[in-house]
């Protein structure tokens, strides 16, 4: 197997491809002790303290030693020969390796590798040495998926057991590189404990981390400051937990930014402090999302649809999602409800859920009621049908109670539309 | 449910497209629903991989090492690492419907996509209910277009309308014969014509094999049209032209497809039924009929002379009188059953 000449340039060129989980960054932590190594080993991520792990590492070194001139492995370098067979798996081996790696770089050079005599593959070796050769396929130095590394990385395994969706994270190559480099004990555990203190349950940690994997690169002190800020604004602990759960990026915002956003909502909506707080707790993604759609929607409600300020405030406190709704859908729904169904503003204000439903559903049900002659939306007259009953109940109950018809009739009617 | 579910997901089925929905969005919605159903199967059992680990041999006094095969759990195939099992499906659409039109739309999944071309080659007719409104003319022949003209329509009676419709049907009948490239001098061709089985088996402009008036309540009138090689805009133009023939104007307020080949309104699935289970059942139900129809079409033509017509020489065999019996005749004669509520 021809080494080095072709493999080194290939390995180096894989560094340039940013879209791959880049082993070059890994080697800063686990630098290759020698350029003539199999490229597979260079990609070794953080070693776990499992039994077989360091042995694999050693053994790959040994196999490559069979055809390179010299093979510095960690302790074999100390002992100066290949015949070492004491492979006591333990944690101190790992720490040994960790300590030795920086020194390797300094000591190693190509000349020293040439000093040791080359071993021929046909040279007979003893039985113990034979069974100690492990020819596992080496880890790929660059990959587009975390599947290749998950079995060899304790961090990734623990994250999967927590419920983090690695298939989504691997779509962001920076995130995947970050996770591979992190150490569970040192970095991740602290942040997880912090999140648990905040009030997140165990089964909620997975989805949270899938969305906001960048929280691992945040400083714990900053996170604590932000939580303290929220508490100073009279958000209760349960409120903060709920907000963080529904908007995972909340804690990645600086205090200044959070302050600006809270101030914006208070000024724009002109609600009392308590109501703004409730609004933000119900829909925390108002704080993390863009503010432009909110400004636009406020203008749409006021100018285009013609609602008064207090009406808008009432609707928003009932259905906060209206602030971030799609403008085109809003206008289409309002156009149908106001002009075709002839429902005046003051009744629409009482039932803002109508802006939260699909227009097709409203149309179908309205046309069915018109066909049956039961489309009566004026509260003053008898047989009044309120808008929330029109949209918020499932089909079967709607047919039975509101329309006094069977579900089959409704389906037959739908096929005539 | 994953793999067995996918195994039953090959074939043709029909959905009811509501007005106001683009056919492409409909196809994407169905793909999403099917993927959701397929990915919702129970999580696989955790896999293990075999590793040969070094460990001390039992029963030896020294520290002799030996390789033992052990199964260790592996997370490579865990759903959270691998992602969803199914990420895309091949779904094809048959004869398309534009945004304002509604009605039966044939879709194909998986291997059924092959059958779509074959089904197109059978050149079966489609049945539409077209609603027209007298008194207006717009630029796009629909109600919401820019108004071009307004006219009176008091002089229009049902009789006049039906006379115009029969004129239209007659002229299209001539075109049908011409585009079917049959030599009418032969006996078989004459018999086919008598039974009403002549139809074009290659590219042709829109041809109407039957049209009649279902309802006439001025200004509204309802037509049933059986046609082939049409687009919905051409049907709207037809309504406009009928208005012009009646010395007034008309716009089309609704185009609804009630039958597409052998798929009728009864086979069409409503929006609430667009999930894996219902679609699989619909495919199973439609499969035998589709197979029968396609077989009829593939049977080679027996002996009728053909003329190279305006559409060019025929490709492979002109289908026979035995072909397309079901839908073609049903289309022309059984309009009564297919009328629905409107």
Image: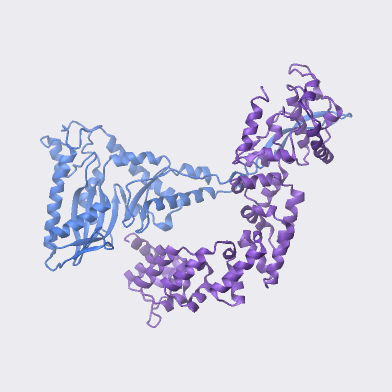
Chain colours: A purple, B blue
Q: Please identify the quarter of the rendering in which residue A231 is found.
A: bottom right
Q: Is residue A393 visible?
A: no
Q: Left or right of B286: which side holds A87?
A: right
Measuring from the top left, give residue A320's x and y in whole percent.
Answer: 53, 69
Number of numbered discs overlaid on the protein picture: 0
Q: In this view, does B141 lie above or below A335?
A: above
Measuring from the top left, give residue B13's x and y in whole percent.
Answer: 38, 48
Q: Which residue lies furthest to the right in this view?
A: B61
Q: Can residue B266 be seen in this view?
A: yes
Q: Left or right of B216: which side holds A123?
A: right
Q: Please identify the quarter of the rendering in which residue B77 is found.
A: top right
Q: Which residue lies furthest to the bottom in this view?
A: A380
Residue occupying image coordinates x 43% and y 58%: B272
Measuring from the top left, give residue A292's x and y in whole percent.
Answer: 51, 64
Q: Is residue B224 above or below residue A133?
A: below
Residue occupying image coordinates x 49% and y 75%: A312
Residue occupying image coordinates x 43% and y 66%: A330
Q: In this view, does A250 lie above or below A59?
A: below
Quadrant into which the C terminus of chain B falls? bottom left
Q: Please identify the quarter of the rendering in which residue A107 is found.
A: top right
Q: Left or right of A43: which side holds B180?
A: left
Measuring from the top left, give residue A399's x and y in whole percent.
Answer: 41, 68
A161 and A117: which is toward the camera: A117
């Amino acid at each position: 197997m021809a080494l080095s000449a072709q493999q080194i340039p290939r390995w180096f060129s894989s560094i340039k491809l940013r879209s791959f989980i880049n082993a070059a960054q890994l080697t800063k932590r686990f630098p290759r002790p020698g350029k003539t190594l199999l490229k597979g080993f260079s990609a070794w991520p953080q070693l776990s303290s499992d039994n077989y792990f360091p042995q694999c590492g050693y053994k790959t070194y040994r196999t490559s030693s069979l055809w390179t001139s010299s093979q510095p492995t960690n302790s074999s370098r100390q002992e100066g020969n290949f015949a070492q067979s004491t492979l006591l798996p333990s944690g101190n081996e790992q720490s040994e390796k960790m300590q030795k790696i920086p020194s390797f770089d300094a000591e190693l050079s190509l000349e020293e590798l040439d000093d040791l005599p080359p071993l021929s593959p046909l040279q007979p070796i003893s039985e113990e040495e034979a069974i100690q050769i492990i020819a596992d396929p080496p880890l790929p130095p660059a990959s587009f998926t975390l599947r290749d590394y998950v079995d060899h990385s304790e961090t990734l395994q623990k994250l999967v057991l927590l419920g983090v969706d690695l298939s989504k994270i691997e779509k962001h190559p920076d995130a995947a590189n970050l996770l591979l480099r992190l150490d569970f004990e040192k970095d991740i555990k602290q942040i997880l404990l912090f999140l648990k203190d905040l009030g997140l349950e165990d089964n909620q940690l997975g989805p949270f981390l899938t969305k906001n994997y960048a929280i691992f690169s945040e400083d714990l002190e900053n996170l604590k400051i932000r939580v303290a800020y929220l508490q100073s604004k009279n958000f209760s602990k349960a409120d903060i937990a709920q907000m963080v759960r529904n908007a995972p990026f909340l804690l990645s915002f600086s205090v200044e930014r959070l302050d600006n956003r809270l101030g914006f909502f208070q000024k724009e909506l002109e609600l009392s402090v308590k109501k703004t707080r409730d609004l933000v707790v119900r829909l925390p993604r108002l704080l993390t999302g863009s503010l432009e759609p909110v400004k636009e929607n406020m203008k749409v409600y006021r100018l285009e649809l013609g609602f008064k300020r207090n009406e808008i405030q009432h609707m928003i406190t009932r259905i906060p999602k209206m602030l971030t709704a799609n403008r085109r859908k809003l206008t289409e729904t309002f156009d149908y409800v106001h002009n075709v169904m002839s429902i005046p503003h003051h009744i629409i204000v009482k039932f803002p859920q109508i802006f939260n439903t699909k227009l097709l559903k409203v149309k179908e049900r309205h046309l069915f009621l018109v066909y049956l002659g039961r489309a009566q939306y004026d509260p003053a007259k008898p047989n009044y049908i309120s808008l929330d009953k029109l949209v918020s109940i499932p089909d079967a109950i709607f047919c039975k109670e509101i329309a006094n018809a069977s579900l089959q009739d409704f389906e037959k009617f739908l096929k005539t539309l | 449910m994953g793999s067995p579910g996918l195994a039953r997901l090959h074939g043709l089925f029909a959905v009811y497209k509501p007005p106001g929905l683009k056919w492409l969005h409909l196809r994407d919605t169905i793909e999403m629903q099917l993927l959701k159903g397929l990915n919702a199967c129970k999580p696989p059992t955790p896999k293990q991989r075999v590793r040969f680990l070094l460990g001390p041999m039992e029963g030896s006094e020294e520290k002799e090492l030996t390789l033992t095969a052990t199964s260790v759990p592996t997370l490579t195939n865990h759903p959270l690492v691998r992602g969803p099992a199914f990420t895309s499906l091949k779904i094809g659409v048959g004869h398309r419907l534009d945004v304002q039109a509604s009605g039966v739309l044939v879709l194909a999944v998986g291997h059924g996509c092959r059958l779509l071309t074959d089904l197109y080659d059978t050149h079966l007719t489609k049945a539409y209910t077209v609603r027209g409104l007298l008194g207006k003319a717009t630029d796009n022949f629909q109600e919401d277009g820019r108004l071009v003209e307004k006219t009176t329509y008091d002089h229009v009676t049902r009789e006049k309308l039906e006379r115009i419709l029969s004129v239209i049907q007659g002229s299209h009948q001539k075109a049908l014969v011409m585009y079917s490239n049959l030599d009418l001098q032969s006996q078989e061709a004459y018999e086919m014509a008598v039974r009403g089985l002549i139809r074009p088996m290659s590219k042709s402009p829109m041809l109407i094999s039957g049209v009649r008036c279902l309802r006439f309540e001025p200004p509204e009138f309802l037509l049933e049209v059986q046609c082939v090689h049409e687009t919905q805009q051409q049907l709207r133009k037809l309504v406009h032209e009928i208005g012009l023939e009646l010395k007034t104007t008309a716009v089309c307020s609704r185009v609804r497809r009630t039958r597409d080949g052998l798929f009728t309104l009864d086979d069409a699935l409503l929006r609430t039924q667009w999930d894996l289970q219902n679609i699989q059942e619909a495919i199973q139900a439609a499969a035998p009929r589709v197979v029968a129809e396609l077989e009829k079409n593939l049977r080679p033509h027996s002996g009728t002379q053909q003329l190279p017509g305006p559409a060019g020489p025929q490709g492979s065999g002109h289908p026979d009188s035995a072909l397309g019996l079901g839908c073609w005749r049903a289309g022309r004669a059984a309009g009564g059953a297919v009328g629905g509520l409107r």
